[in-house]
Image (cartoon, helix red, strand yellow):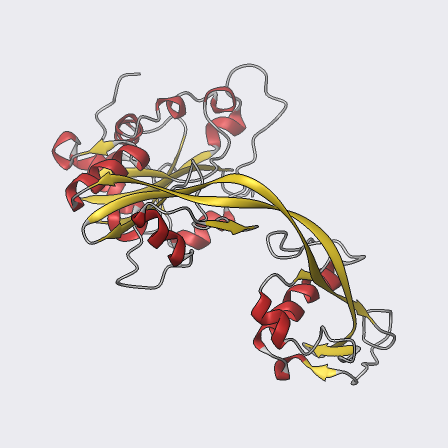
Amino acid sequence: MAVRSTRMSDLTPSRRRVLAGGLAATIGAVSGCLDESVTGGPTDDERKRVLRLLLSDAGETLRENRVDDPEERDPIWDEAAFEAVRAGESYTVQYRKPFFSTDGDPTHAVHEGTYYRLGSVVVDEAAATRPVLRLFGVEGDGTEGTDERDTGGVDAETLPRGDRRAVRIAHFAARARGNTGGIPVDLVERGGYVYRNQDAVEASALLPADGPDRVSYRDTTYRVAVERERFYEPVYRATGEVVAESPGQMETVLRALNLGPRVSKEGLSADAREILERAMFGGYEESHPYSGAYEEVLIALNERAYLDGNVRKDAPRQWTGSRMLRYDDRYYDYRLVFKPADGDE
């Protein structure tokens, strides 16, 4: 589609609107709903639906956010595994990946100017018996149709650190039990909390046979139930590979892995540059058919599918993950989302 030459001053208020809210609030308000009944060309609703562009600053280098440096701050992964990788030694860990790395989201780290890509492979399976803490409502705790609260039980805040974490996570499962809503599935396991840290097991006040049978958390008293159950867990071997020997080389690797379009100010018209600048401060939006300047921006972003008004067929409804743009000397995460015309949200 040819690019029309349109100045920002020529755009009508109904087609050129700048968002006043912040980026996070704006994304959260987007519904992204598309009319499933459309089978032909663009409908009036599709023509009126606005396309919103949002940019957020990602810094001057990719290394600052995508490379771990244990010398500057403690990483959340297994530092002993990193030492073993550098020494060429075998290192295994049960249940949890040593670096939390995946093929789609690899972990990179630096040590004395050498950059590594870190990962792991499953090399075995191990059986283990683990304590599982589950919490259940008791009569009068406010969860069984009464406002009366049971004040018995040990206060969770007085427990050892490992128990406090266990109670907090088991509380999520107890709160969701029998109710709609859901639970944090990355924390709750088997309807409660599984103790896997041996130090937390040994220091626990809840796990011993003579431990308290009730615990109070957030003004609610729960009955404590502890079971020891069998688990079969993967055994991971840490892996690592040198990918760069200098900051510049590492930056090149990260660009190849993460970067999408590369746009220069000189390659854009003044109106297109203004759109990008406004998209950095709250967002920019237009309804279809788009102005020539907005079309120019979409083409520069390699998002030509959005130029067609029949967006239901040609453009993605929503993205999983973000896309990255390099605009002159900085990186930006950018997102394109649809929202209904005014009054339709």
The residue sitting at 81% across, 70% down in the picture is 137
Q: Nearer the viewer, residue 218 or 233?
A: 233
Q: Is residue 8 visible?
A: no
From the top left corner, tell me how far across and down residue 247 is, in percent. Answer: 17, 46
Q: Nearer the viewer, residue 31 or 40?
A: 31
Image: 148 above or below 263: below
Image: 44 above or below 227: above
Which residue is most to the top?
40
From the top left corner, tell me how far across and down residue 321 is, in percent. Answer: 44, 40
Which residue is most to the front?
89
Q: Please identify the quadrant where the N terminus is shown.
A: top left
Image: 151 above or below 321: below
Image: 263 above or below 77: above
Q: Please identify the quadrant where the C terminus is shown.
A: top right
From the top left corner, tell me how far across and down residue 191 is, in percent. Answer: 73, 57
* Location of residue 76 (image quadrant): bottom left
Q: Is residue 121 visible?
A: yes
The residue sitting at 78% across, 76% down in the picture is 209
- Tell me: 163 left or right of 71: right
The residue sitting at 72% across, 62% down in the picture is 132
From the top left corner, tell me how far across and down residue 236 is, in percent. Answer: 51, 45
- Tell me: 341 left or right of 190: left
